[in-house]
Image (cartoon, grey):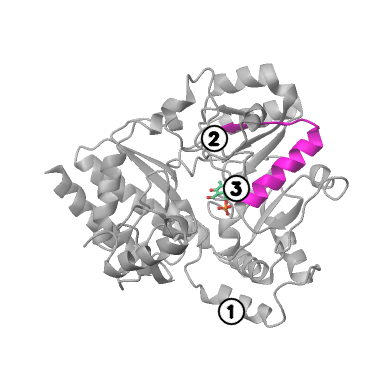
Amino acid sequence: MSLAGPKSQTLQKRAQAVLPLGVNSNFRYWGDGITPYVDKAKGAYLWDVDGRRFIDYRMAFGPIILGHAYDEVDAKVAEEIKNGVLFAMTGELEVQVAEMITEMAPAVEMVRFACSGTEATMHAIRVARAFTGRDIILKFEGNYHGMHDHALWSTYAPVEAYGNRRSPIPVPASSGIPASMRELVITLPFNDFEGFERVICSYGEQIAAVITEPCQDNCGAIEPQPGFLELIRKRTEEYGIVFILDEVKTGFRIANGGAQEYYRIKPDLATYAKALGNGYPIAAFGGKCEIMSIIGHGVAQGGTYTNNKPGVAAAYATLKLLKEKPILESIQKRGQRLMDGLKDIFEDNGIPVVMSGHPAMFSFALGVDKVTCQRDWAKSDHEAYIRLVEMAMERGVMADHDAREPWFLCYQHSDNDIDETLNVFADLVKKTKK
Ligand SMILES: Cc1ncc(COP(=O)(O)O)c(C=O)c1O
């Protein structure tokens, strides 16, 4: 059976007549005739339009932290939307959610809501520029901060285009980004202590913000080396630069307090989306009162849908559950078992592997022994990774086709799901080795 069954293939052809590539986000296109189309999902499982069931490790690229169609979240949304979904006015529930976020996230004193991670990082960057009166943004190669022009640089270009690591070239990830915006962005390899020191020393006083994912969860979950986030914190403080931690993937997933709690790091601003609403459209950015308070005083922020009731209600129910039950601990335990099991399978078969990331959102790179930045990661064996993932799909296990995208776990992945996944991989890895 192909990655896409006959019904997916038919739907793809129909979709391609009305949607570019037949999808509503380029990341969902795997190729002609091989892109699966979805019917439904529940808990840890997803069914495609051909009726095949998969153990889902994509989790919609991270938002699904509790499980698909999670009853308690859906019930809260259903209850709330009976009384309207949008008012262009502020209500109590969103104040409660803002209070919950500030309680859970160590560095967040005030927040504003948005509808997507893209919006959250765009607003955070604007606030940082307004606060500092500076224009330049420093970001790291391989980090993805959403679709706006300010940070869609050096995300997933072939690394050869990035030039020498001592003088990296920012590469736009799309046509249509004005070339003049290159003047406003500096890129560096992640974990490059020396490069970071050099850039800060030369340009520190012109930089508005350093924005980073805490762990490169859009590039094989490359972890920060000990001291790297701390170095960013220290130098940004010294130079009056706003440190933006993009927690769109890590927030409410790797700890209740996100990467701030997990890595014990306090940025000036942080951005959230994904797990905040278990899949409903809600995002947020927030941080120090001193910085957030400039919003509304000459600094624009808003949006018709920013406090949409389904999103706010879902965030309320999701955060309440995270606070009341050891949900993330349970995900972490199962994720660790999966990570350990996969590592053993590769090693037992003599395949070099680097496991990385957090058990709730991890990745593995094959055929390499060390990965500290996207330039290293690019040397790993993606072909072998894709082959394995494609074969696993035929056996009912779905990870993303793109090796940069981590494996995501949710609360409803069971021990049986982990066992089944490990059995499939043990078998496949043995077979591919022959
Ligand atoms: C770290 C990070 N920031 C921002 C975004 C953009 O979020 P959205 O897709 O909700 O616009 C993403 C999306 O994957 C992300 O992973």
Magenta stretch: dominant secondary structure: helix
Q: Which residue sits furthest right?
A: 297
Residue 260 point in image, percent of width and height: 62, 45
- Under mark 2, the amino acid is Pro
Please state which amino acid type lies under the numbered disc 3. Glu
Label placed on residue 374 = none
| First in sequence: mark 3 vs mark 1 | 1
Start and end of the magenta stretch?
Answer: 118-140
Q: Which residue has dot 3 on it?
A: 247
Q: CA distance from mark 2 to mark 3?
A: 22 Å
Whether residue 272 sits left or right of residue 422 in the image: it is right
Kindly check if marks 2 and 1 are in contact, taking CB atoms under 8 A apart as contact.
Answer: no
- Which corner quadrant holds the N terminus? bottom left
Identify which residue, 264 or 1, lies in the foreground.
1
- Report if residue 271 is visible in the image: yes
Q: Are marks 3 and 1 in contact (CB under 8 Å)?
A: no
Judging from the image, what secondary structure is the residue with disc 3 in?
A: loop
Can you say which quadrant of the picture contains the C terminus?
top left
Q: Does residue 138 show up magenta in the picture?
A: yes
Which is more toward the observer, 302 or 284?
302
**Is residue 414 something one can see in this rendering?**
no
State the mark number for residue 75: 1
Closer to the chain start, of discs 2 and 1, is: 1
Q: Circle 2 sits in a helix, a strand or a loop, which is it?
A: loop
